[in-house]
Structure formats: structure tokens, C-alpha cells
Amino acid sequence: MSKAKNIALRILQILLCLLFLGTGISKLMSRPEVVEGFREYGYPNHFYLLAGAMETLGALALLLPRTAVYGAAVLSMVMIGATGTVPAMYITWLPATCARPNSASRS
């Protein structure tokens, strides 16, 4: 691989690390807007802590060449979950199993 390509990939790794570290740490800090967002999505209490831990650990793993593949895999799982969550909240024609949870059932 060329030196320029290696440098570009390393910069991309660092930028992704910073992005996921920021979002992961905000979840681990239990910021009120994060907690409310997860509650609106219908996730169980404290699920945001699991998501934050996965984002933080995945981001840190991206920095080390030996663990970058594993970090990318963890972050991919997080993003697959996020990709499934948002449409389920706003697209009304999805099957009932994907539909927005009843807000009255949450307490």
C-alpha cells in the first residue's frame, strides 16, 4: 500500500475514533438528552450505557492496528442497530414488530 494511502486511512481511523468517542462518552455520562432519546426509542432503562460502552471501546480499538478490525466490527454492530432504530420510529408502514412502541406502556 502506498504511503499516501496509509496516511489517509490513519487519518480516517483517528477521525472515526474521535466521533465515536464523543458519542460514546456522552452516553456513558448519562446526559439527560441521551437518556430521553433512548426512552423515546423504547429501549430498556440503561441500554444507553451498553451502547456507550460499545462505542467507546470500539473507538479505542480502532486506534491500535492489532485491534482495528475488532473495533470496526463492534462499531458496525452499533450502527446496524442505529440504522434499524430510526426508521422504525418514523416509518408507519413497517410491520408491527418494528413499529414504535406504545408510549403508554412505558413507565
Image (spheres, grey):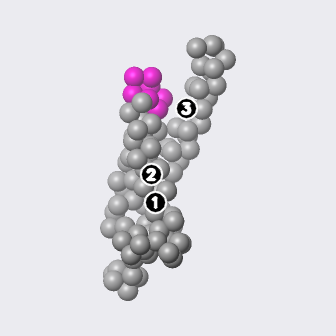
Point out the residue furthest to the right here.
4
- SS state under label 2: helix
Q: CA distance from mark 1 to mark 2?
A: 6 Å
Q: CA distance from mark 3 to mark 2?
A: 19 Å
Residue 63 seen in render: yes
Looking at the rendered structure, the kind of residue marked 2 is: Ile
Q: Residues within 10 Å of mark 1 (few under 14, many from 20)?
A: few
The image shows residue 35 at horizontal and vertical percentages of 44, 66
**In which quadrant of the rendered image does the N terminus lie?**
top right
Looking at the rendered structure, the kind of residue marked 1 is: Gly
Residue at image mark 2? 80
**In which quadrant of the rendered image does the C terminus lie?**
bottom left
The image shows residue 17 at horizontal and vertical percentages of 52, 38
Q: What residue lies at 53% left-to-right and 72% top-to-bottom?
A: 91
Residue at image mark 1? 84
Based on the picture, tell me whether residue 105 belongs to the magenta stretch.
no
- Give the magenta-colored segment's residue range: 60-68
The image shows residue 81 at horizontal and vertical percentages of 42, 55
- Do residues under tags 1 and 2 come within 8 Å of each other at their CB atoms? yes
Closer to the camera in the image, 97 or 27 = 97
Closer to the camera in the image, 61 or 2 = 2
Q: CA distance from mark 1 to mark 3?
A: 24 Å
The image shows residue 57 at horizontal and vertical percentages of 39, 40
- SS state under label 1: helix
In primary-sequence order, the first of circles 1 and 3 is 3
Residue at image mark 3? 13
